[in-house]
Amino acid sequence: NNIGVIFDLDGVIVDTAKYHFLAWKNLADHLHIEFTETHNELLKGVSRVRSLEILLNIGHVTLSEERKREILISKNEDYLGYIKKMNADEILPGVNNLLNDLDSKGIKYVLGSASKNAPLILKQVGLLQRFEGIVDGNSVSKAKPDPEVFLIGAKKLNLKPENCIVFEDAIAGIEAANKAKMISVGVGDEETLNEADFNFNNLTEIPQDFFSKVIS
Ligand code: B16
Ligand code: MG
């Protein structure tokens, strides 16, 4: 097959944003920073280090590099507590059907996520073995909106970027896909993701003939 798919993880395959929120909120409370679900939107698709910078900016708090490192470790430990309780029930609607459909069409797919915990999360929900490859926060030197994560994904698929279709829920991810010259599919709010080539509310909405029509 001459096309392939790259899936973002958080917001496309599973909703881990709610666990990131709980962990960041816990930390924000400790630092006496007011942190809401609206603020949490700013962290979607953004790296862990950058997320902390955004949180500290919200609270106008400055910390030493050493303190930031400690905080990032404890935030992640807290987050992993939630991740370790995840199971296949948390796979988002439409995901299993879409992966089955891609398998039956012989279209390969890889993961392209900012998360350093991506392999663990996929393992928890029983999807790790299904992907042709995993590109995560450990494999890249530049975070989304830099296209690096998706360009490595294209290499794993052995495909040219223009033959890759990226499913993303975050603005930074759509930007990264567009910069990589891939076909970008926004999953979620169409107005927020208006730079995407295609938009769907969730993966149940992808039409059967989408993949045969999308690249001609
Ligand atoms: P971690 P994605 C992203 O996942 C999340 O959307 C973002 O909120 C998080 O900060 C980032 O992963 C890093 O995650 O702390 O687990 O390394 O949407 O790129 O799959
Ligand atoms: Mg995401």
Image (tube, rainbow, N blue to C red):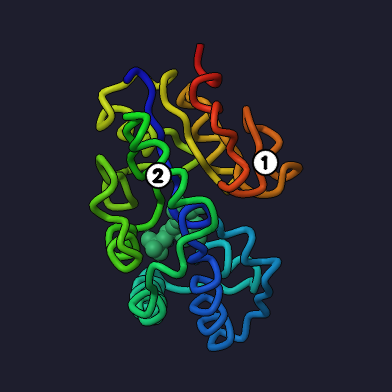
**Residue identified by numbered label 2:** 99
63 left or right, relative to 76: right
Query: Across the whole image, how many numbered discs are drawn on residues?
Result: 2
Q: Secondary structure at mark 1?
A: loop
Please tell me how crowded label 1 is: few (under 14), some (14-19), or many (20+) other residues with Cα within 10 Å. Answer: many
| Contact flag, marks 2 and 1 (Cβ < 8 Å) | no
Q: Residue at x 49, y 26 (%)?
A: 211
Where in the image, quadrant-wise, is ligand 1 located?
bottom left
Q: Is residue 74 above or below residue 145?
A: below
Nearer the camera: disc 2 or disc 1: 2
Residue depicted at 38% across the width and 22% down the height: 3
Q: Hey, which quadrant is residue 143 in on the image?
A: top left
**Mark 2 to mark 1 CA distance (whole Å):** 23 Å
Q: Quadrant of residue 81?
A: bottom left
Residue 198 visible? The answer is yes
Residue 90 x, y percent position in the rendering: 46, 68
Residue 92 point in image, percent of width and height: 51, 59
Nearer the observer, 116 or 31: 116
Image side of residue 128 versus residue 74, left or right:
left
Q: Is residue 50 visible?
A: no
Q: Which residue is mark 1?
A: 193
Vertical placement of 101 versus 123: above or below? Answer: above
Along the horizontal axis of the image, is 182 left or right of 1? right
Q: Percent from the top left, x then y, of residue 188? A: 65, 49
Residue 12 pos. (x, y %) = 51, 51
Kindly identify the residue that appears in the image at 48 percent across and 35 percent down. Answer: 166
Does the beta carbon at disc 1 come under 8 Å from ligand 2?
no
Is residue 2 positioned above or below 148 on the image? above
Identify the amino acid type marked 2. Leu
- The amino acid type of the residue labelled 1 equals Leu
Mark 2 residue element: helix
**Quadrant of the rendering where the N terminus is positioned:** top left
